[in-house]
Every structure is written in C-alpha cells, then in structure tokens.
Image (tube, grey):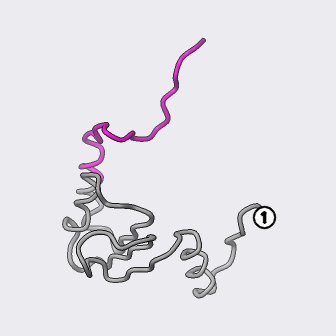
Amino acid sequence: WRGLIKPDIIFFGESLGDKFSTAMEYDKQRVDLLLVLGSSLKVGPVNKILQWLPARVPQVLINREVVGAPNRFDVELLGDCDAVVRELWARLGWEGLEEEGEEG
C-alpha cells in the first residue's frame, strides 16, 4: 500500500474545524493560567486567545522576543524556550527534567 498518512495536526492554512471552538468555550471558564511558548501569535484564531480569556487569568510569555501589544502579558520571560523552562524548573526546585540526551 502506498500513500500519504496525515499526522493528527493542523497544517498552516487548514481550518481548525468545530473542535477548536468547542474546546475553547469549554476551557474558557476552567483555565487558571495561560502559557505562550515560542509563538509569533500571528496566526488566527490562536492569536485571539489573549483577548478572549477572562482578565483574571494570568498570562505568561516565554519567547525569544516580545509579541503582541506592549505589556500584554503579565510576565514576559525572554530567551530560548528550552533554556527558560529549564531555569524555571530549577528555581522551582522541581525534579525529573533530564538534559537532552540523558537517560531517565
């Protein structure tokens, strides 16, 4: 058998379908933190999430550069996403984050 097997992802330019909006409505009242990692926030409808969430939800950006309106995020941690997350992990005293290539 020869053919292309499409992974379970949405490619650029493809419609997200009803599942996305249904999940967003469901999650809207349940979310307690938004983390944005490594995104330009240029592609909709994901770029609308920031305005769509209730103001009570803290929003954290981990990215190489600031995206969106100035001061849009409650916290902006700039740098390589992997490095920033590893630093957060260490400062929080969490265990179990192995370096790339380590067994564990």
Residue 85's place in the image compared with 93, above or below, is: above
Tell me where residue 61 sits by quadrant: bottom left
Q: Which residues are magenta?
A: 1-23
Q: Position of residue 97 (x, y in %)?
A: 67, 71
Quadrant of the rendered image containing residue 53: bottom left
Residue 66, percent from left and from top = 35, 73
Which quadrant is home to the C terminus?
A: bottom right
Q: Tell me, yes or no, whether the highlighted magenta stretch contains residue 3.
A: yes
Task: Judge whether 58 appears above or below 29 on screen.
Answer: below
Question: In the visual, does 81 lie left or right of 100?
Answer: left
- The residue under label 1 is 102
Question: Residue 84 placed where, x, y %?
Answer: 54, 76
* Amino acid type shown at disc 1: Glu
Camera-nearest residue between 81 and 89: 81
On whether residue 79 falls in the magenta region, the answer is no
Where residue 81 sits: x, y (%)?
A: 52, 69
Horizontal relation, residue 83 to residue 27: left or right:
right
Residue under the point 59% across and 79% down: 89
Q: Quadrant of the N terminus?
A: top right
How many numbered discs sit on the rendered protein? 1
